[in-house]
Image: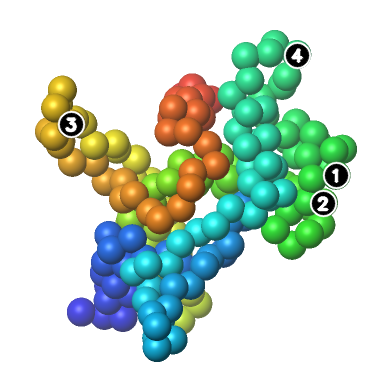
Amino acid sequence: MNIGNRVENHMSELAKKQLLGGNLFGYRLKKAVDDMGNPMPEKDSLIQEPVEAYVVKTIFELYTSDDPEVVKTSSSICKYLIDNNMRTFKGDLNWTPSKVIRVLANTRYMGYQLPEKSKVVDTVRKKKVLTHVEPVRDVLDSKGNIVTKGNLVKINCEPIVTEEMWCVVVKLFCNTCG
């Protein structure tokens, strides 16, 4: 097994164990430690950063708006964010359409992680490619039992947006890409 496969398998296992990587726009990673000060990564959590969480929520609300006056493109959302002085993770106003799309496509904002969404293809150059794995929710019966297991893993954080809003964004993406 080559290094790329080992890294890929390890990342998948971390995601399935709900282990979080690091800071994310809208959140800060709170590292858990036991009474002796030893790290407990399985209990780490993402804590909302209020100003950034507001920006994330604004991006989702603009994109899913029913108002015909609101143009729902990543470029128009960038313009709105810049015009309203809403800053990026780095604290600047350098919003790009790809940054907006990354926010909209990130499952962590609804409280889930999607394992295997990317794959390491070159460990030397640290090159990753998207696998285009579609997020699939668990299907439950009337008693709440899992009928069909999805590929989303619940993570330890308070969601910034609802699952319903995130799913509306995914449906809108599908309409725009054909």
* 174 or 166, nearer to the observer: 166
Residue at mark 3 to residue at mark 2: CA–CA distance: 44 Å
Residue at mark 2 to residue at mark 1: CA–CA distance: 7 Å
Residue at image mark 4: 69
Is label 2 or label 1 in front?
1
Q: Is residue 47 visible?
A: yes
Residue at image mark 2: 93
* 18 or 126, nearer to the observer: 18
Please give the name of the residue rendered at 46% of the width and 62% of the height, measured from the top-left corner: 45
* 143 horizontally vs 26: left or right: left
Marks 2/1 in contact by CB < 8 Å: the verdict is yes
Could you tell which of marks 3 and 2 lies nearer the N-terminus? 2
Marks 1/4 in contact by CB < 8 Å: the verdict is no
Residue 134 appears at what percent x and percent y? 34, 40
Residue at image mark 3: 144
Which residue occupies the extreme top position in the image?
Answer: 68
